[in-house]
Image (cartoon, rainbow, N blue to C red):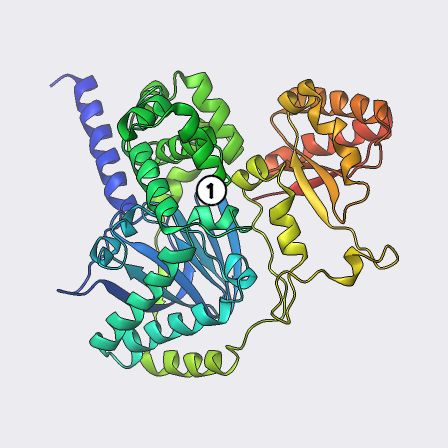
């Protein structure tokens, strides 16, 4: 066999092995649809579960959860839902103990026929807290952990798990996260999920909007407006996000060239894939593959925790399961910056949050100028927003409101970012809005030096103060 063929065969075998290491299928006991484990987590490899939804609940210490393009820092009592097939890794503190729950969503169609099509968005400190259901969900999770690890009561475990899944399906999809100003009806939810499911199954199509419209016998305009009105996310961003996440999985599990990855993910060419991938991950596809492949091969450092120790931690958490008094905090994610910049209602709802149970009550600082605090409203700014002129011309509309616009720029290389800031500074000066807060968001320590230089130049040449924001 020629040497080239031998090398090619070996490389293929390596990629097959990488794919198996990455896709960890959860083994459920016969007849079971939930599995509960408690571990002392130091770190895991980068992996995904194609057959299970995962929920992590921190019983002790701290846990950093990196899932696709997002990262969450959880403390004891915090929990987060990780969607099926999402690449993720966990890194715990030295004293960490974490319960890891897995659910076979395909077995919960009796609760929701589309349960395994839902993209969930649920972290303890965010939507759950906003809805004052953080304690309710925490209690259900502790019940599942208790029944699955300590009491070993299979019948009660299944009942509690079903109750938890029912609550998640009814109100913690990605649509519920971005559409907090009004509830999504059952009919709207079903229609949206069917559209989303079609998108996921046909990512390689070049005109998904046309395909969805034809499949469901709608006009393209109707589909576009329905998705935006129901989920507060534009159809184009739904498609781009889905394609980028699919490309991420291909980069981690296959030996495909960038051209193949682009084609299989529905991008017209490598240049378009790269531009969209940079938007979400702040890395090119090649950089992401090189940086993250080693994480799929690293050893897991986790140890099982005895049932007795778990029982003691559960008792401790039940004693402080009462509703928290902290206000909810938004997870600043790429899709949030892209879609909420022009929507003040989500931030307004968060601002009005009251711990006395009245979500709609307006705090005194909203009406009394002497007590008014600064509530920042992040607004994404790129060349398109500056060229249209609509964004800056609308800044004056915030003068009498209780929010302050904060212009968010994403670092995309030294030259491109410098040009963007120069253009922004000129326009801010022309409308007399020099004092508007400006953030420059970047990721990775390698970009820090370039970001500092850009900020120094912006200050020296334009008198513009720019705040660097590191998003790992």
146 relative to 9 in the view: left or right: right
Q: Nearer the viewer, residue 42 or 368?
A: 368
- Helix or strand or loop: what does disc 1 sit on? helix
Residue that lies at the very extreme toward the left in this rendered image: 1
Residue 418, visible in the rendered structure: yes
Query: In the displayed structure, does residue 335 sit left or right of residue 6?
Result: right
Question: Which residue is pictured at 74% across the width and 62% down the height?
Answer: 363
Total number of numbered discs in the rendering: 1
Nearest the eye: 194 or 410: 194
Q: Is 237 or 438 nearer to us in this picture? A: 237
Query: Taking 460 as reference, is 360 above or below it?
Result: below
Q: Position of residue 140 (x, y in %)?
A: 39, 72
Side (left or right) of 327 relative to 320: right
Residue at the (22%, 59%) spot, across then down: 110
Within the image, what quadrant is residue 247 found in?
top left
- Where is residue 327, by image quadrant? bottom right
Counting from the top left corner in percent of width and height, residue 148 is at: 28, 73
Q: Which residue is mark 1?
A: 231
Q: Position of residue 35 (x, y in %)?
A: 26, 65
> If the image is split into quadrants, where does the C terminus sit?
top right
Residue 250, horizontal then vertical, whole percent: 32, 32
Of residues 305 and 181, the one nearer the viewer is 181
Quick check: 408 left or right of 25?
right
Q: Quadrant of the N terminus?
A: top left
Q: Is residue 61 visible?
A: no
Q: Residues within 10 Å of mark 1 (few under 14, many from 20)?
A: many
- Taking the spot 50% from the left edge, 77% from the top edge, the residue there is 321
């Amino acid at each position: 066999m020629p040497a080239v063929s031998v090398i090619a065969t070996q490389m293929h075998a390596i990629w097959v092995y990488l794919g198996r290491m990455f896709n960890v299928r959860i083994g459920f006991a016969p007849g079971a649809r939930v599995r509960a484990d408690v571990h002392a987590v130091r770190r895991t490899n980068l992996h995904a579960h194609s057959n299970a939804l995962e929920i992590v609940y921190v019983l002790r210490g701290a846990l950093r959860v990196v899932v696709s393009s997002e990262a969450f820092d959880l403390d004891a009592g915090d929990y987060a839902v990780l969607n099926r097939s999402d690449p993720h890794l966990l890194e715990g503190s030295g004293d960490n103990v974490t319960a890891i729950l897995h659910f076979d969503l395909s077995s919960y169609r009796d609760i929701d026929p589309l349960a395994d099509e839902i993209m969930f968005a649920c972290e303890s400190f965010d939507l759950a807290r906003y809805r004052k259901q953080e304690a309710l969900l925490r209690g259900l999770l502790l019940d599942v952990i208790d029944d699955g690890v300590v009491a070993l009561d299979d019948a009660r475990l299944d009942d509690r798990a079903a109750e938890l899944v029912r609550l998640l399906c009814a109100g913690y999809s990605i649509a519920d996260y971005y559409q907090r100003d009004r509830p999504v009806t059952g009919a709207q939810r079903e229609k949206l999920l069917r559209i989303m499911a079609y998108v996921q199954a046909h990512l390689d199509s070049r005109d998904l909007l046309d395909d969805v419209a034809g499949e469901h016998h709608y006009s393209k305009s109707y589909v576009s407006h329905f998705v935006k009105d129901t989920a507060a996310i534009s159809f184009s961003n739904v498609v781009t996000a889905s394609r980028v996440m699919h490309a991420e999985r291909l980069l981690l599990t296959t030996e495909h060239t960038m051209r193949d990855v682009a084609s299989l993910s529905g991008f017209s060419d490598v240049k378009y894939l790269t531009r969209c991938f940079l938007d979400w991950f702040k890395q090119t596809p090649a950089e992401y593959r090189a940086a993250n492949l080693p994480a799929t091969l690293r050893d897991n450092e986790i140890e099982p925790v005895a049932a007795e120790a778990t029982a003691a931690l559960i008792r401790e958490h039940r004693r402080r399961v009462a509703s928290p008094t902290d206000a909810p905090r938004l997870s600043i994610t790429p899709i949030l910056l892209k879609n909420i910049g022009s929507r003040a209602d989500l931030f307004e709802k968060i601002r009005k949050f009251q711990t006395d149970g009245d979500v709609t009550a307006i705090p005194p600082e909203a009406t009394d100028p002497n007590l008014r605090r600064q509530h920042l409203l992040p607004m994404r700014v790129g060349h398109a927003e500056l060229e249209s002129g609509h964004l800056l011309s609308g800044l004056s509309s915030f003068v009498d409101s209780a929010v302050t616009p904060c212009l968010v720029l994403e670092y995309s290389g030294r030259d491109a970012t410098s040009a963007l800031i120069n253009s922004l500074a000129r326009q801010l000066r022309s409308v007399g809005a020099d004092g508007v807060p400006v953030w420059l968001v970047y990721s990775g320590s390698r970009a820090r030096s370039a970001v500092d230089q850009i900020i120094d130049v912006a200050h020296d040449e334009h008198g513009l103060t720019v705040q660097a924001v590191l998003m790992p």
